[in-house]
Image (cartoon, grey):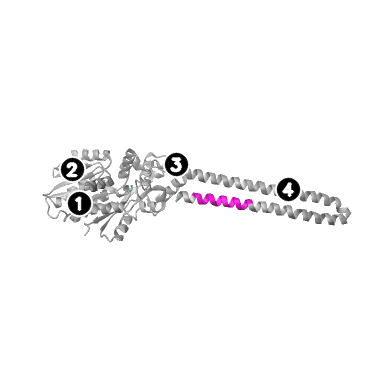
Amino acid sequence: MRDLNTDTFAEQQQQRARTTCIFSFTGGIALLWIAPRYSDMVQCRILNRKSLYRIGKVFIRKTAFLQRSLLSASIVSTNLYVSSANRIIDHSSRRAAADMASPLRSLVEDDERYLKSFQLFLERSSEHQCMHDFIQGILPGELASVGDGKAELNVFGVGSGSGDIDLEMFSQLRQKHPSVTVDNQVIEPSSQQIHNYKVLLSKTPDLDYIKFTWNKNTAAEFEQHWKENKMSKKADFIHMIQMLYYVKDPDATVRFFQSLLDKNGKLLIILVSGRSGWGKLWRKYRRQLCNTEISQCVTTRDIKSGLESQGVAYRSYALPSHLDISECFVEGSEKGELLLDFLTEVLDFSRTAPAELKAGVLEMLRQPDCSVETDGKVIFNNSLEALVLDPLP
Ligand code: HSM
């Protein structure tokens, strides 16, 4: 889209230059044609009045001079116009070429910086607090019926990260089903996060009832492996928390994992809500910010409309949350830059984004659509939404 727009602009400039060229030359030729006739006319009158003869000659010379000047002025101005249009065209095509050569890099390409900015995001936001409230308040009701009386429950954590949210959910599952054992498949592509998860396990008591299987895979790799090996295992509880941003086709991923649910199984999806500041930011800057190969600007609104179009039922729960983004507006603040990376999903956004985009994003971030300003702080709307799906009929 961006390249197409640039071409259209360049073409318009070229067209304008061509039109001016034609008009200027036509104008010049018309002058050449009219001026001699006019000078002849003047000359005739002057010949009849001898006293004006000299003045007439000067006038004729001047007319000829004027005629030449006008013609050369029109040529010069046409040239100037053409060359300035060419400069614009050059600039546009250079910009288009540069855009093609160096698109903004996605933050997820740099695992270390991603984790650093994510950590800062967690410190500045109430993201984990609102998940904690949901896990304590709502999730137990959803988990009560899973397993249909089985002695062992199969759980899939898709994009489990460092496992802290997983362990909170296990604690609720355990309270609802005190005598079951759990077979837990962890599906997580980041070795650093798997390491963090294992460290957390080593520090957490009373987890003997859970068997952990580590799949260092993306959801897509896991799906491919599952299909190739014609696996038939069914799951009682699958969770995908803040991970559908990182799959190529979020709707298809939801469909695949929902198809793995056993009777009474539950699929839990948590994402930012369509009404959050994220939703507003992405509606305006999706094209510039989202590298759709590795990260999607997807909200629960998108997932819900996909489900609705297929007639799939879901239950929805709002998880209000906020994020302090004040540092993003402090020029040169390292933490502000890290937060901006997380907000835009662009690696080194402050340094690599075109000035116009950076200014637009910063302006948008503090608009009432995205944030509120209180006590000198800019508080971004980080509201999440949880969707719970039952097995397909
Ligand atoms: N990075 C996409 C939005 C988000 N992820 C919020 C976690 N919390």
Q: CA distance from mark 3 to mark 2?
A: 43 Å
Instruction: Please name the residue that numbered disc 1 is placed on.
Output: 237
Q: CA distance from mark 4 to mark 1?
A: 87 Å
Residue 358 visible (yes or no) = yes
Sequence-wise, the earlier of marks 3 and 2 is: 3
Secondary structure beneath label 4: helix
Q: Nearer the viewer, residue 374 or 166?
A: 166
User: What is the x, y in percent for residue 162?
Assistant: 25, 42
Instruction: Please name the residue that numbered disc 3 is placed on.
Output: 101
Q: Nearer the viewer, residue 280 or 376?
A: 280
Amino acid at pointer 4 = Arg
Sequence-wise, the earlier of marks 1 and 2 is: 2
Span colored in magenta = 6-21
Instruction: Please name the residue that numbered disc 4 is placed on.
Output: 68
Q: CA distance from mark 2 to mark 4?
A: 90 Å
Amino acid at pointer 1 = Phe
Instruction: Please name the residue that numbered disc 2 is placed on.
Output: 212
